[in-house]
Image: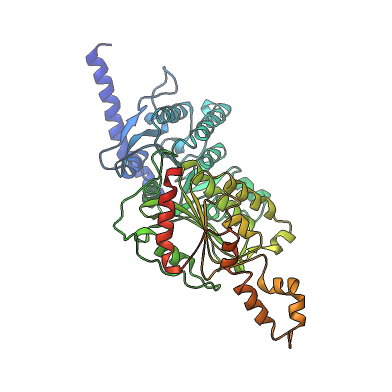
Amino acid sequence: MDNKQAMDSVQKVLARLKASESDKKAKLFPFGKLTARERLTTFFDEQSFTEIGAFIKRNADAEPSDFEGIVAGYGAVDGRLVYAFSQDYSVMNGAVGAAQFKKILALYDMAEKNPAPVVAMLDSNGAKLTEGLLDALYGYGEIVRRASTYRGAAPQIALVMGVCGGSAALYANACDFMIMDEQNGRLFITPPSVAKVLHKDAADFGTASACLQNGNAALMAKGENAVLSNARRLLGFLPTRCGKGAFYTESEDDLNRPASGFETVDDSFDLDAAITSLADDGNVLPVYISGSVATCFVTLGFQTVGIIATDIRVNDGYLLPDDLFVAAKFAQALERMGLPALVLVNTKGFDAKAEATGSPLITAASTLANVFSSFSAPLVSVVIGKVWGAAFPLFASKAIGADLAFSLENALISLMNPLSAVEFLWNDKIAALNNPITDKDTLVNLWNNTVASPIAAAYDGKIDAILSPGEIRQRLIAAFDMLSSKI
C-alpha cells in the first residue's frame, strides 16, 4: 500500500466515524444518554481532548466495529491533565471485548509513565460472548489489577452511567471515588434479576440511591451532564498526583474572618451550616451519606482538606458500624492522595443497642482506628461539642494519630454519659445531697464543669489548645499551614 492509499484508508475510517456519530445520538437519546465521544468532549476543557488507540482492533484481521465500543484519551480539566475512557452503549450495548481491554490498558500504560487522574465512564451490559466469557473475565481481572496498582499514584474516579455489573463493579470499586447516574446507573456483582429471586426485598438492588446509602457511591447526580459536572468539581479538590505536597486552590476569602455556628453544644447543632461557614467561600462538596458521620471536601486557607465529622442530630448522637466504615473509606482515600484530614467530633459515642444485636461495631471501630493510626498526611481533630467514652480516643486523640488535637471552650469530654458517670463514680456525693433525686443535676453540672471540661484534658496534655468558637477557622488554617510540610 503506497502513501496515497494509506491516507485514503485512514480518511475513509475517519469519515465513517463522523457519519456514525449522528446515528449514535439518535439511538441513545431515548435512554437519556450521550455518545461516548460527547461525554468526553463535554467533560474535558473545550478543544482539549486527544484520542488514543483509535484504531485498535480485536486482532489484525478483524474489521474495526465502531472502534470497538470505547473511546479513550487525554485532555485538560480546568487546565490540568486528566486521562479518561468512555464505553459506547450504542455498540452492542457497550459489550466488552479484547479490543476494549487493550485500549484501557494502553491508557493506564500512558498514565503510569506520567501520572494524572484517570476517569472511567462505565456503561456496558456485559461481555462480548462471541469472544469468550472467560477472556472477558480475564480482561477485567487485568484492569482491576492495574487500577489497584495505580492507587496512590493519582486519583481515579469511576462514573457509573449505565450498567456496571459483575467484574466491572470490582473495577469501579477499585477507583478512589464513584459517581453514579441516578437515572441509568446500576452497580452489582449478582444481576438484579437473580437477586430478586433470591431475596424478595431486592427491588432497589444496585440503584444509584441504594449505592449512595450503602457507601459504595460517593456522589449521585441526575443525568449524564450532571454526573460529568460533578466529576469536574470533584477533580477540583484533588491533586494531579498523589502525595506531592499540599494541594492549593484559588480563593479571595479572608483568612482571618471568624466562622459562625460553633457556639452551641446542644443536640440541635447544625453541622452543615457550621462546615459551610468554616470553608473558604463556603466551598463544600459532600461525599458519601452515612447517617451520623458526614464526610466532605472543603478548601481551608486555600488548601484542600477532607472533613470527617460526627453529626449529633442523627441516631440520637450515637455511632453505627456503617458510619464508621464510611469514615474509614474516606480517610483511606485522603491518605492515598496525601490530603489532610480534619476530624470534627460531637457524639455520644457508640450505639450499644447496635452492638447488642450483633452488628460489626467493634470491627468497624477497629478499621477506622487502624486508618487513623497509620495516617501519614496531616490529621487535626477538634471536639466541637460533646464526646463520650471510647469515641474520644478514636476520633479526637493524639494517641490514635492526630498531629494536633483541639477543643472548643464550650465542649464536654467525658468518659461516659455525664449522668451515668455521676451515678457510677460519685455515689458518696449523691448520698450527701439533701434530695438525691431532684438535686442530682447539680452534680452533673459540677461534673461537666470540672472532670468533663476541656481544661482537664488540656492540663493532662491530651488537648493542645482550647479555642473560642470565633477563632476556630483561623487556628485550623494556621495548623494545616504549619503541617503542610509533612505531606
- Residue 90's spot in the image, x, y percent? 40, 39
The outermost residue toward the left is: 4
Q: Position of residue 308 (x, y in %)?
A: 51, 56
Task: Judge from the rendering whether residue 10 lies leftward or rightward of residue 323; answer left or right.
Answer: left
Q: Is residue 221 above or below residue 4?
A: below
Quarter containing the C terminus: top left
Q: Could you say where residue 405 lies in the image, as x and y percent from the top left?
A: 53, 57
Location of residue 412 (image quadrant):
bottom right
The image position of residue 256, as x and y in percent, is 35, 62
| 366 lies left or right of 251 | right
Residue nearest the observer in this picture, 154 or 393: 393
Farthest-out residue, front: 459
- Would you place residue 65 above or below residue 29 in this image? above
Q: Nearer the viewer, residue 243 or 153?
A: 243
For this view, does 386 lie left or right of residue 342? right
Q: Nearer the viewer, residue 290 or 328?
A: 328
Residue at the image position 74 percent from the left and 71 percent from the top:
425
> Is there any visible trace of residue 147 in the rendered image?
yes
Residue that sits furthest to the top in the current view: 2
